[in-house]
Amino acid sequence: MEYTQLGRTGLKVSRLVLGTMNFGPQTDEADSHSIMDAALDAGINYFDTANVYGWGENKGRTESIIGNWFAGDPGRRDKVVLATKVYANMAASTDAWPNHDKLSALNIRRAVDASLKRLRTDHIDIYQFHHVDRSTPFDEIWQAIDVLVQQGKILYVGSSNFPGYKIAQANEAAARRAGTIGLVSEQCLYNLYERRAEMEVIPAAQDYGLGVIPWSPLHGGLLGGILKKEVRGGRRASGRAADTLADPAARSRIQAYEDLLDKHGLEPGEVALAWLLTRPGVTGPIVGPRTAGQLASALRAAELELSEELLAGLDEIFPGPGPSPEAFAW
C-alpha cells in the first residue's frame, strides 16, 4: 500500500480510504469486522465514517460497530487514522428538537461527545463537516473546533460536499484566528462520470492545501461493469445508476466505457478507482465494500497502472468540464 500526506499536513494516509457506510445497513457486524481486519492487514490506515451512518432509527450504528472493533484489540486504534462527520440530526424522529443538527457550537460539542462514546476512543483524528451550514458563521464553528482541539478530542478538521467558495470562506475565517489550522481535507462526489468537481472544488482544495477524498468512485455502481452484469443476470442497476441508464445517451457512454476496458482486458470498477489515483489533488478515493471480495478488487485497483492510451480513451468517453471560468465562459 502506498501512503501520501493528507493535504498540507504531516499526516500520512493510505491511498485508499475504507468507507464504512455499508457497515450495519448492508453488512453485519461480524463481516464488517472481518473487512476492517483485511483492510488493516493490507495497509489501509484511513477509515472514514459519519455519525449518521446506520440511517433511520439505527443512526450511529456504524460508529458503534467500529467502536466494538477497536475494543476487541486496543492496538488497532493507534494504527488507524479515524475520520467521522457531523451535521445530520441524530435525535430520534419522535424527539427532534432545535439544535440537534447542523454546525452550531452547541451541536458540534454534543455530536463530538456522542461519536467518541460510540467509537470507544478518546479522540477523532479528522472531524468533518458533512454539509455546509448556511445559518452558522464560520467564526462560531472555528471557536467550537478550537476548544475541541485544545481538549484533545479532535486533531484535524475536514469538509464534505463543500463548494469551492465555501472552502475559501472557511479557511479565510480560520486564517484570522491565531492557531486555527482550518480545513485539511474535502470529501466530494468525483468520479469518471461526474467530473464537475474539477471546475472549482478541486482547484480550491489544492490552493488551500486540502487533500481531496472522492466519494462514490463508481458512481453508485454505474462504473463497475453494470451492463455486463445485467447481461449475465447479475445485480441490476438501482438508485443513481438506474436513473442514469434510463437516458439512452448515458447508456451508450457506459457501453463504450465497458467495451474499451474489454479491449484492454481490464475490470471496469478497478479502472474507475485507478483513474482517480492519477488525478491531481486526489489523496485517495473512498471504497465502501459490502463484502471481502469487493475490498480485494479495490486493493487490486491500487496496484493498477493505466496507459496513456487508455487514459486518453477514458477522457474521450467522459470528457471533464475543464477549469472555471473557461468551463462556462469564453
Image (cartoon, rainbow, N blue to C red):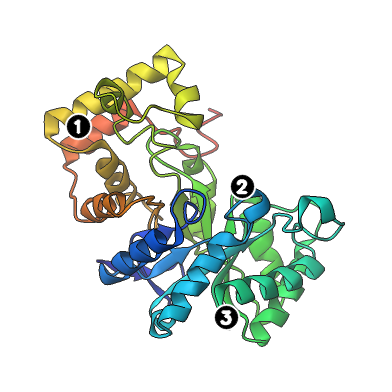
Residue at x 43%, y 53% (from the top left corner): 27
Whole-angstrom CA distance, mark 3 to mark 1, is 43 Å
Which image quarter is the N terminus in? bottom left
Q: Nearer the viewer, residue 21 or 162?
A: 21
Is disc 2 in contact with disc 1, using a CB cutoff of under 8 Å? no
Percent from the top left, x then y, of residue 170? Answer: 67, 61
Whole-angstrom CA distance, mark 2 to mark 1, is 32 Å
> Crowding near pointer 2: few (<14 within 10 Å), some, many (20+)?
some
Residue at x 21%, y 38% (from the top left corner): 267
Name the N-terminal-most of marks 2 and 1.
Answer: 2
Q: Mark 2 = which residue?
A: 163
Amino acid type, label 3: His
Residue at x 36%, y 29% (from the top left corner): 318
Percent from the top left, x then y, of residue 190? Answer: 45, 43
Element assignment for label 2: loop
In the image: residue 46, left or right of residue 304: right
Percent from the top left, x then y, of residue 110? Answer: 75, 71
Q: Is residue 295 above or below residue 119?
A: above
Q: Nearer the viewer, residue 311 or 262?
A: 262
Whole-angstrom CA distance, mark 2 to mark 3, is 28 Å
Q: Nearer the viewer, residue 271 or 73?
A: 73
Q: Which mark is residue 261?
A: 1
Q: Mark 3 = which residue?
A: 123
Percent from the top left, x then y, of residue 48? Answer: 48, 62
Amino acid type, label 1: Leu
Residue at x 69%, y 75% (from the top left corner): 113
> Crowding near pointer 3: few (<14 within 10 Å), some, many (20+)?
many
Q: Quadrant of residue 309?
A: top left
Q: Which mark is residue 178?
A: none
